[in-house]
Amino acid sequence: IFKKDIPLFKVNISGLIALNYVPLRVEVLDQFNGVLGYFEEANFTSVSFSPGIGINLSSPRIDDRFSFYTELRYVRNSFSDNVYYPSSTYNQNDVSIKASYIYFPISFKYDIPFSEAANLFLKGGLLKTFLIDSEYNNFRSNTSVPGVPPTNDKDRFDFYSTQTGYLLSIGYQRKLTEKLDGGV
């Protein structure tokens, strides 16, 4: 009887590029307008590419569809907006936020095959982000009385943050060539 030699563990290491779309909405309650009137509401959006490396560990002897998955990706988001408030003493604000971090999910992956070349997958687990660098700037042009030349101020804050959360995703993966897969 011919028996195929199936490895106990199988590791796939792959390079990846992800597209990040991050909408960020900022608003402050009316009771804080006197203190933070220059930052009432703003809508920011960041679109960026994120390079990284993915590691998939499975055990074909047990179940080739179930695996442990992790990746390391570098993410850089950049938001900017010119916010104008005619009813406030802080009339105009050029706000910019920049942040770069490492994206590190620790998850389990389950493949649902459609064919030998395509499958759906489910991933779930923990997500950790490590902040590398950040910058917040707000250049304010302040006029309290119409017709009076504005005074200009520049606010700057630094962020010190690492986030932990949960990850749940669904995706589609297809074999493009023998060694190249594509997925969404």
Image (spheres, grey):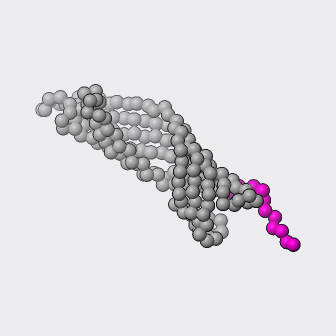
Range of the magenta residues?
1-13
Q: Position of residue 11 (x, y in %)?
A: 71, 55
**Residue visible at 61% across and 61% down?**
111
Between 147 and 116, the one nearer to me in the picture = 116
Query: Residue visible at 57% across and 44% down?
Result: 126
The correct choice, above or below, for 144 with respect to 166 in the image is: above
Quadrant placement of the N terminus: bottom right
Magenta portion: prevailing SS class: loop
Q: Is residue 88 toward the left or the right of residue 53 in the image? A: left
Give the residue displayed 50% in from the left and 34% down from the top: 161
44 is higher (above) or lower (below) than 114: above
Residue 152: % across, % down: 26, 30
147 inside magenta stretch: no
Q: Residue at x 33, y 34 (%)?
A: 138
Asked whether residue 9 is drawn in magenta, I would say: yes
Q: Residue furthest top?
A: 35
Residue 94 can be seen, yes or no? no
x and y percent of residue 135 in the render? Answer: 43, 36
Which residue is more in the foreground, 35 or 29? 29
Q: Is residue 89 left or right of residue 80?
A: left
